[in-house]
Amino acid sequence: MSQEPEVTYGTVKLPGNYFSKDKRNYNDFRMAWAREGMQNSLDAGATRIDFTLASEPDSDFLTLVCQDNGSGMDKDTLLNVFLELGGSKKPEGGIGGFGHAKIVLAFAHKEWRLSTHDMEVTGVGGEYSLKSLDSWHQGVRLEVKMGLEDNSVWSMRKAIEQIVTNSNLPKGVVVTLNDEELKCPRSKPRYNLNTVLGDLNFDDKPHGYDSSNLWVRMNGLAMFKCSLWTSGTTAFEGFLDLTGNSVDVLTQNRDGLCSDQNEILNKLMQELVNDREKLKLGGDIDLTLNRREVKFEHLSAEDRAELYGLAEAEKITPTEMMDKLNSLINEMVDPSAMNPFRHLAEKVKSIQSELDDRIGKIPANWYPENFKVKFSDSDTSPENAHKHGGLIASSMSLKRTAKMAAGWSRMINELLDTPEYRDVLGVEKDTQGRFFYRDRLIQTGFVFGSVEGLNVVEKDQNRISILLNAQKANSEKWIYGDLIDIAHHELTHIRVKDHSESFTQVMSQLQRVSRRHIPEKTLIKAFKEAVAELELPEKPEPAPEPKRVAPKDAYTHEFNF
C-alpha cells in the first residue's frame, strides 16, 4: 500500500521592511499621505479635517496626526477593510476604491495608532493590537510616527499645504494645519477648455518662469501634479478636473492616469505649451461677415425652450427654426403680420442689435463672403466685448485692413486651387470653386489678439476658418513671405491639429509643393491682383508709416498699399 504524500500548510510571510518599501511606489509619499488622509476623511463626510505636525528635539522621527469629524468606522469595517490588504468599502462616486492607501497611510511607517468610535488599534508595520475605549470618538484620528531618514517637518508641511491649497473642496469643509486654516482658492483661472479627460482651467505665468504645472484633481481633490520644463515661451499653471470613476481613470497609487488617458494628458500638456493661445479662445466676439445670424448661446434658457417648442410645432429641427427666424426676422416683427413667432423674433432682433452695437459698424461690403472675425480672449464680459469690439471695428474700417483681407483670401484660395497642394491636405473642390475638408467649408478671416494666425473649426463643425492677425501684420511691418509662412502653417492644421512630428512632415510637403507648383511670385501676384480688384470709396487716410527695407527678392517684397 502506497504512502500518502506529506502535505505542508503555511502562510506567506512578510519581512519586517515589506511595507516600508511601499513608499518607493509613489512619486512623493509625503504628498500621497496628505492626499489619502484627505480622501478618507472626505469620503466619510467630514466637514473638518485637522492636521498636526511636530518633531521632538534630537528624535529620529516626526509625529503626524490627521483627525476628522466624519462617520468613522465600525468594528467590521476596521477589521475587514482597514486591516485587510485590498479591502475597500468606498461608495460609488467616492474618490478612492483601490484598498491600497492604508499602506502609505499607516503600515509603511515606524508606528501608527488609529482611534475611531470606541476602539483604538496600535501597530508597527502589519502587526497590531486592538482594544476598546471607555470614551466615544467621532470620526477617525490617525497618528503616525515617520522616520526622518527620508522626511522632514518642512517637506511634510509643504506636501500637506500643496494638496489642500490646490484642491477645490466642498463648501463648508475646513482644513487646518497646526491650528491654522489652509484655504483653497475659490476663483477660477482665466481660461477654460473642455477636454475628453475633464474640465481644464489655466492661467499664464509671468515671464521668467520655465516650469509649467497642471494639477490633476478627482472630485475636487488634488491627486498629482504634472510639470513640464519649457524654454523660449511663457509657462502656465492650471487644474484638470477629471470626469469618470477613479478606479477606471487613475493608476493604483493615484500618482498618474491609466495608459490611454495618460497619453491624452501628455498630448494636452504639449498643446498647452505650444498652442496655448489657440486653446484660450473663447471670447464673445465671434462672427462671420456677410452672414449675420443669432446663435443658440445668445438666447436665454427660457427663449431656447420656446424655440424648441416652435420647432416641434412646425415639425422642423431647432437649427432650422433658428435659420427661419434669422431669414424672416423683419417680416415676423411686423405688428400687422400677427406672426405666431413674433415674440421670439423680437428677442432675436434685439440680440442682433446688441451684437451689431458691440462689434461696431464694420463695412462688411469691403470684405469677402463668409469672412470670419474672432478675438482671442476668454473675458466675455459686456465691457470687455464692447471695448475690443470698438477696436476691431476701427481697425476693419481702414482701407489697408480691407485690402489685407482681399489679398489674404486670394492667397489661400490660390494655394488650395492647386491640385497637388490639395492632395497633401485631403481637401476637395466643388463645382462652385469652394474648398472642403471632410464636408467642412474652408473660409478665411482675421483673428485679433496675440496670435499671428489661427485655424478654427466652428462649433457646428461645418466650417474651418484660416485666420490671419491683420493688426500684427500691419503694426509689425510683415512682408509677403511672412504671410506665406503663416498660410502654410495654418493650412497644415487642417490635417494635423497639434505640433507633432506629423505636423512638421505635412508642412514640409506643402512647402515643397508650393515651391514647385505655386512659386512665391505667383502668390504675391495673386495677392496684388485681389487688392487691385477691390472697390473702396475714396477717403483720406493717415500718412503711412516708413517702410522697412527688405532684400529685393520675390519672397520678401513688402506690402505696397
Image (cartoon, rainbow, N blue to C red):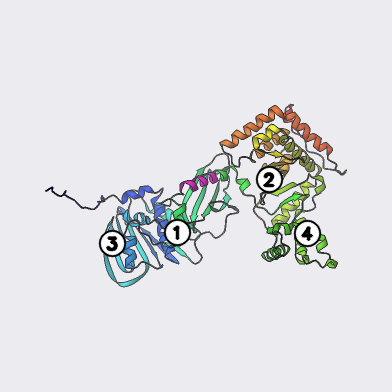
Residue 561, visible in the rendered structure: no
| 413 w.r.t. 282: above or below | above
| Horizontal side of residue 65 vs 235, given as left or right | left
**Quadrant of the frame with the C terminus:** top right
- Find residue 118 and report its horizontal and vertical position in percent: 31, 70
Residue 91 in the figure: left or right of residue 551: left
Q: Quadrant of residue 339?
A: bottom right
Find residue 95 and name its label. Answer: 1
Tell me the residue that label 3 is attached to. 122
Q: Which segment is the magenta one?
A: 258-269
Label of residue 353 in the image: 4
- Density class for disc 3 (Cα within 10 Å; few <14, some 14-19, many ≥20) is some
Image coordinates of residue 175 in percent, x first then y, are 45, 63
Of mark 3 and mark 1, the one earlier in the sequence is 1
Give the mark toward the camera: 2 or 3: 2
| Amino acid beneath label 1 | Ile
